[in-house]
C-alpha cells in the first residue's frame, strides 16, 4: 500500500523516511550499520563501481553531521555522499558540504559535488541530487551479496 505524505508530515523515524525513499525515484537499499543509512552504486566509464553513501536526518542537524558523513565516506571509500534531511540546511552546513569540493567521474569530464544535501521537500518537488547513473545499484548489490555468501565456510 502506498502511503501519501504531505509536506507537513513529521518523519519521526528513519523507517518513515526510508518508506518515502522506497516509493521515490532514489530507491536506495537500506544498510543501517556503521553510520550508513543507505547506499547507491554507480559504474564509471572505466567499468569500476563506486558507492554513494546516504545519511538521513529526521530532526535537527549541524555542520558536525556533515563532517561525520564525510568521515564515513572516507572510511568506506565512497567518492560521493548524500544527506537527506527533513529540515533545510543552514549556511554553515552548505559551506561545510561545499568545502569537500567536486569529484570527477573517471573516464569522463563530468563533475559532481562530493556531498549534497537535499530535503524531503526537495524530493517532493522533484528536485533530485546530481548523481551519476545509479541504475545498476540493485544489480551490484545482489552481486555483492552472492559473492559474500560464496566466501562463507559452512562448518556444520
Image (cartoon, rainbow, N blue to C red):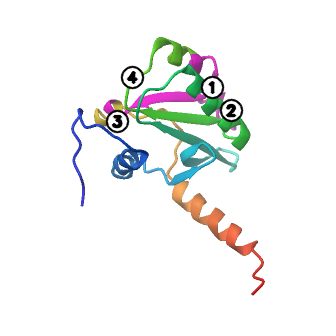
Residue in view at x 33 percent, y 40 percent: 11
Gap in Å between the C-alphas at discs 4 and 3? 12 Å
Residue in view at x 55 percent, y 53 percent: 31
Q: Is residue 32 left or right of residue 4?
A: right
Q: Are marks 4 and 2 in contact (CB under 8 Å)?
A: no
Q: From the image, tell me which residue sits under label 3.
A: 123
Secondary structure type for disc 1: helix
Q: Which mark is residue 44?
A: none
Secondary structure type for disc 3: helix
Q: Are marks 3 and 2 in contact (CB under 8 Å)?
A: no
- Label 4 Cα crowd, 10 Å radius (few <14 / some 14-19 / many 20+): some
Does label 4 or label 3 sit earlier along the sequence?
A: 4
Q: Residue 138 at x, y = what percent?
A: 52, 59
Does label 4 or label 2 sit earlier along the sequence?
A: 2
Does label 3 or label 2 sit earlier along the sequence?
A: 2
Q: Residue 120 at x, y = what percent?
A: 35, 34
Residue 136 visible, this angle: no
Secondary structure type for disc 4: loop
Q: Which mark is residue 88?
A: 4
Amino acid at each position: 500500500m502506498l502511503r501519501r505524505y504531505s509536506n507537513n508530515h513529521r518523519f519521526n523515524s528513519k523507517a518513515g523516511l526510508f518508506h518515502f525513499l522506497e516509493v521515490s525515484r532514489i530507491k536506495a537499499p537500506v544498510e543501517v550499520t556503521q553510520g550508513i543509512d543507505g547506499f547507491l552504486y554507480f559504474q564509471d566509464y572505466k567499468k569500476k563501481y563506486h558507492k554513494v553513501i546516504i545519511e538521513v536526518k529526521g530532526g535537527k542537524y549541524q555542520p558536525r553531521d556533515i563532517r561525520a558523513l564525510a568521515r564515513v565516506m572516507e572510511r568506506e571509500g565512497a567518492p560521493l555522499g548524500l544527506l537527506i534531511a527533513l529540515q533545510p540546511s543552514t549556511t554553515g552546513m552548505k559551506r561545510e558540504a561545499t568545502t569537500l569540493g567536486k569529484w570527477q567521474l573517471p573516464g569522463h569530464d563530468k563533475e559532481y559535488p562530493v556531498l549534497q544535501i537535499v530535503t524531503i521537500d526537495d524530493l517532493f518537488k522533484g528536485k533530485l541530487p546530481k548523481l551519476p547513473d545509479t541504475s545498476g545499484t540493485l544489480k551490484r548489490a545482489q552481486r555483492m551479496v552472492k559473492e559474500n555468501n560464496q566466501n562463507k565456510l559452512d562448518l556444520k
